[in-house]
Amino acid sequence: MAPAYPGPVDSPRARFAELGTLARTLVMGIVNVTPDSFSDGGRWLQPDVALAHARLLRAQGADVLDIGGESTRPGAEPVPVEVELDRVLPVVRELAAEGAVVSVDTVHAETADACLRAGAVFVNDVSGGLADPEIFTTVAAHEACYVLGHWRGEPATMNELAVYDDVVAEVRAELARQVDAALAAGVDPGLLVLDPGLGFAKEGRHNWELLAGLGSLRAMGYPVLVGASRKRFLGTLLADPDGTPAAPLARDRATAAVSALAAAAGAWGVRVHEVLGSVDAVLVAAELRRRSP
Ligand code: PMM
């Protein structure tokens, strides 16, 4: 299959290289075109509303826009690919035509293929190829960028799989296995990004240990993306004295703090709902890194 965007400027490879020249941690803005995502389900379900939101995030400084049409919150039920495509494809097509760097958040090869043809640059696969192994050949055929996330199973049952002796070592080993499978299917190692999958078969303490172990994940030799935005472990951290977790929308300042610290630890990117705080955070981290002895 010929790559959808083979030109020297517009190819995923060229866009990826362009992002690398920014010499700072990237900010990926989240656009969930879903009725049921945990923090913003239903807010951007209409394509025109999703588009307006994506444009706002881009204007606020998001380097990449991540468009998703299937919720992966714990307990979420899968949606048919046709429904997912109806939600994301018009948004992906329009944003790509406007010159945005677009990522599609999907675990399905068919959705990835259609979105790459419509101009997406990244496939963001939280299952790391476990949900639909065909996704590797699709990504390879398009010479697309691929975010390979750590997970252990479907959202409906993943909480039961959050059992680790050494979460950093086990996530590393499981990511390495999926990296090998991706490379064997032809995915370009130069276009690969790894993600520890915070919240995917992880309890709060596992998320914290993975954040503390970012250096060990980076040592695998690939760029690392961190997706902490508004997740439950931040709500727990910020709980009321009576133990009530902070609401998802009250977790944005803590998310920006994670962005600063992840950037300081050398993360390639942070995936966030609220872009402004994380743009400032990664700029602060970049300035400090530049001046560090
Ligand atoms: N988390 C969610 C969805 N997609 N993608 C990546 N790469 N990393 C993540 O941690 C991640 C993701 C779930 O959060 P959401 O429903 O708010 O998008």
Image (tube, rainbow, N blue to C red):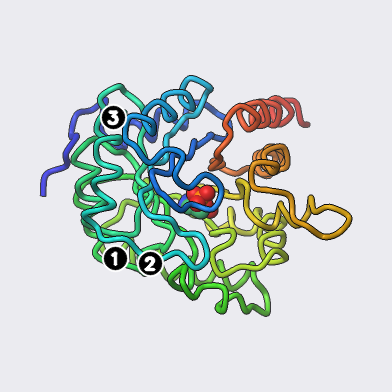
Q: Which residue is mark 3?
A: 96
* Residue drawn at (67%, 75%) of the image: 166
Disc 3 vs disc 2: Cβ atoms closer than 8 Å? no
Q: Secondary structure at mark 2?
A: helix
Locate residue 247 relative to residue 144 in the image: left or right.
Answer: right
Q: Looking at the image, is mark 3 or mark 1 nearer the viewer?
A: 3
Comparing 25 with 118, the one in front is: 118
Q: Which residue is mark 1?
A: 184
Comparing 256 with 8, the one in front is: 256
Q: Quadrant of residue 249?
A: top right
* Residue drawn at (32%, 60%) of the image: 79
* Residue 161 seen from this side: yes
Q: Is residue 131 above or below residue 142?
A: below
Q: Residue 188 at x, y = what percent?
A: 32, 51
Which image quadrant: the C terminus? top right
Q: Is residue 257 above or below residue 204?
A: above
Q: Secondary structure at mark 3?
A: helix
Mark 2, Cα crowd under 10 Å, few <14 / some 14-19 / many 20+, is few
Disc 2 vs disc 1: Cβ atoms closer than 8 Å? yes
| Residue type pointed to by label 3 | Ala
Q: Residue 112 at x, y = what percent?
A: 26, 51
* Residue drawn at (22%, 59%) of the image: 137
Give the CA distance from mark 3 to mark 1.
29 Å
| Residue type pointed to by label 1 | Ala
Locate residue 135 relative to residue 278 in the image: left or right.
Answer: left
Q: Which mark is residue 163?
A: none
